[in-house]
Image (spheres, helix red, strand yellow):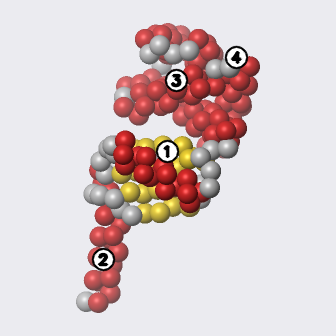
């Protein structure tokens, strides 16, 4: 399926989930569940295969996702939603649904989401300093989406909307390498 179709599916499902969560005053609980699920998917190749494989039957996907949601202690709305998505064979679009839901929630709160990649996990002090600096630059509340990319070697890559600041050691070394090639 094309990425455009995936985006449309994700947008429709996230809009429905957001509306239901808002009616039930469960926006934050659902967001926390979705963030947990996103982390689980990122950490588990088996879970990614289960969600994306057309070979796994609808029934098996529903059963597995249902058990996962219960074991993770997800909100009842999140559990029902995941069951519906599995029943409709739309688990492949779950990444997009999660992203769209979190973006809707951030927009409702007047927040901006910044993606921060670092070579090593950041401690709370570092995260606070980055958040404060970004808030000063952006002028509104900033939600950080943190990830670790050892290939960066050091430093950070920060993306806010269409803007990106790459202060990684990898990029600095690449620039130095290009400059040295130009000299020699």
Relative to 67, does residue 122 appear above or below in the rendering? below
Q: Marks 2 and 3: which is nearer the front?
A: 3
In contact (CB < 8 Å): disc 3 and disc 1: no
Q: CA distance from mark 4 to mark 2?
A: 55 Å
Residue 89 percent across, percent down from the top left: 60, 21
Q: Marks 3 and 1: which is nearer the front?
A: 1
The residue at the point 56 percent across, 47 percent down is: 142
In contact (CB < 8 Å): disc 1 and disc 4: no
**Labels 3 and 4: the sequence-earlier one:** 4
Q: Marks 3 and 4: which is nearer the front?
A: 4
Q: Residue furthest bottom?
A: 183
Q: Which residue is mark 4?
A: 24
Residue 100 percent across, percent down from the top left: 63, 37
**Labels 1 and 4: the sequence-earlier one:** 4
**Labels 1 and 2: the sequence-earlier one:** 1
**Labels 4 and 2: the sequence-earlier one:** 4
Element assignment for label 2: helix
Quadrant in which the N terminus appears: top right
In contact (CB < 8 Å): disc 3 and disc 4: no
The residue at the point 69 percent across, 27 percent down is: 18
Residue 178, by quadrant, is bottom left
Q: Is residue 63 visible?
A: yes
Q: Which residue is mark 1?
A: 144
Quadrant in which the C terminus appears: bottom left
The residue at the point 29 percent across, 70 percent down is: 173
The residue at the point 29 percent across, 58 percent down is: 154
Residue 42 percent across, percent down from the top left: 41, 34
């Amino acid at each position: 399926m094309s990425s455009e179709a995936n985006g449309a599916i994700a947008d429709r499902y996230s809009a429905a989930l957001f509306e239901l969560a808002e009616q039930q005053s469960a926006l934050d609980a659902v967001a926390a569940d979705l963030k947990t699920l996103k982390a689980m998917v990122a950490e588990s190749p088996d879970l990614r295969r289960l969600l994306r494989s057309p070979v796994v039957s609808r029934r098996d996907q529903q059963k597995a996702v249902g058990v996962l949601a219960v074991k993770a202690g997800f909100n009842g709305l999140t559990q029902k939603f995941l069951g519906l998505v599995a029943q409709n064979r739309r688990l492949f679009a779950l990444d997009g649904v999660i992203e769209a839901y979190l973006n809707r929630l951030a927009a409702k709160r007047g927040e901006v989401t910044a993606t921060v990649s670092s070579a090593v996990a950041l401690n709370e002090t570092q995260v606070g300093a980055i958040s404060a600096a970004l808030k000063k630059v952006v002028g509104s509340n900033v939600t950080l989406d943190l990830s670790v990319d050892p290939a960066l070697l050091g430093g950070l890559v920060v993306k806010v909307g269409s803007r990106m600041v790459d202060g990684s050691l990898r990029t600095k070394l690449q620039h130095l390498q290009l400059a040295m090639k130009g000299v020699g």
